[in-house]
Each structure stands twice: as structure tokens, then as C-alpha cells.
Image (cartoon, grey):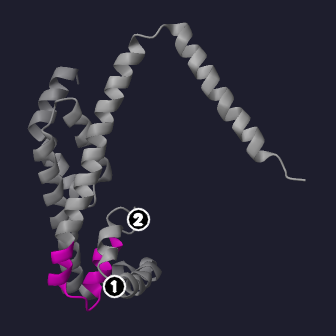
Amino acid sequence: MDIASFQTSLEHWGYLLLFFASFGGGYTAIVAAGVFCALGKLDITLSLLISFTGNCIGSSLLAYLARTQKKEFTRLLQKHRRKLALTHIYMQKYGIWLIFFSKFLYGIKTIVPLGIGLSHYSLKKFILYNIPACILFTGSIGLISFFASNWMLDLFSKIEKIKGWQIALILFIFLSCIFLSMQIISKKKH
């Protein structure tokens, strides 16, 4: 696949891929969309809206399916009983904040909606808090990746102008500083 056909595919299918990838959380998809937006291949506003919609529908659907299909989900999640029990404890301890924090914690962002679906927690309440949590998650991850990509593109364009020996000198100084720092840190205190 050449670059032109990749760009055409991205323009046609990128938003659809972003939607479905955001269904299950979508860290990577949101970051990739931010990068492609910085490159001018996708629109940042539309990408954030699509990833928000996919993330919100996906986590709400997980909670709903767990609530309506408790027996099947309980059987399927036998290996994750400890995580589900911790979700119930954390929900009692942290309340709605768990819905917000779970979006950013890899490994539990799908367990929390499932745990809420399997518990007696109100689905309406979950969906009500899930909407701003999804806005915060997709907005922060998408915008950080967008602006970081712009910053990296600017940095690379400046690095392009630096001569080879200057890059080697900067790299040598940087690695020397890391090495010396590691030596100082790893010395045993007497």
C-alpha cells in the first residue's frame, strides 16, 4: 500500500475505525487520531466527538449488557471475580469518582462498567456520570496527543536544520548526564 492510498483509506475509514476502537476504551485510537489531526489528515473536533460517542456508548452498553445478562457475564468473568469485588468496594469508597478515574486506568476501564452492571448501582446514574467522564477522557487524551504532535513536528523541523556533529554532541551530553545520574543514585550510602 502506497502513501496516497493509505491517506485515501484514512480519510474514508478513519472516523469509523476511531468510533469502533473507542468502543472499548481506545487509548491508542484517540492518540492516533490526535496525531493524524496534527498532520492535517483528520479534523480534531470531529475526531473528539466521534471518540467520545464511541467511548460513551461502549461503556454504557457494557454496563447494560452485564445488568441484563448477569448469569452469562458472571460465568464469563469467573477469573476476574477479585477485580469485580474490588470494583464494588471501590465504588462504595470512592463513589462517582471511580467512574471518572477508571477511564484513565488501563485494565480496569472495562471492569468498572461490568462491575456496575452486575451490582445494584443505578444504570441511569452511571450513564449520567459516564457522559462527563467520557468527555474528560477523550478531550484530555485527544488534545494532549494533538498538541504534543504539533510540538514534536516543530521539534523535528528544527532538528532537521542542525548539523550531524551537533546532534551527536547533544546526544553524547544527554547520555552522559543520564549515566552519571544513575551512578550517583545507585551508590550505596555508607
Question: From this viewpoint, is residue 109 visible?
Answer: no
Q: Secondary structure at mark 2?
A: loop
Q: Residue at 25% of width from left, 46% of height from top?
A: 143
> Image height check: is 69 above or below 110?
below
Residues rendered magenta in the picture:
109-129
Magenta segment's dominant SS is helix
Q: Which mark is residue 62?
A: none
Circle 2 residue: 107
Labels 1, 2: front one: 2
User: Residue 13 lies in what quarter of the image?
Assistant: top left
Q: Secondary structure at mark 1?
A: helix
Q: Is residue 186 located in the magenta-colored stretch of the structure?
A: no
Extreme-bottom residue of the structure: 120
> Image height check: is 80 above or below 172?
below
Circle 1 residue: 74
Extreme-right residue of the structure: 190
Q: Is residue 114 located in the magenta-colored stretch of the structure?
A: yes
Q: Nearer the viewer, residue 10 or 55?
A: 55
Q: Nearer the viewer, residue 93 or 105?
A: 93
In this rendering, would 60 be left or right of 152?
A: left
x, y (%) of residue 99?
Answer: 29, 73
Of the residues shown, which amino acid type is indicated by label 2? Gly
x, y (%) of residue 142?
Answer: 25, 47
Q: Residue at 15% of width from left, 42% of height from top?
A: 44
In this rendering, would 138 be left or right of 11?
A: right
In this rendering, would 94 be left or right of 168?
A: left
> Image height check: is 130 above or below 74?
above
Q: Nearer the viewer, residue 109 or 69?
A: 109
Of the residues shown, which amino acid type is indicated by label 1? Thr
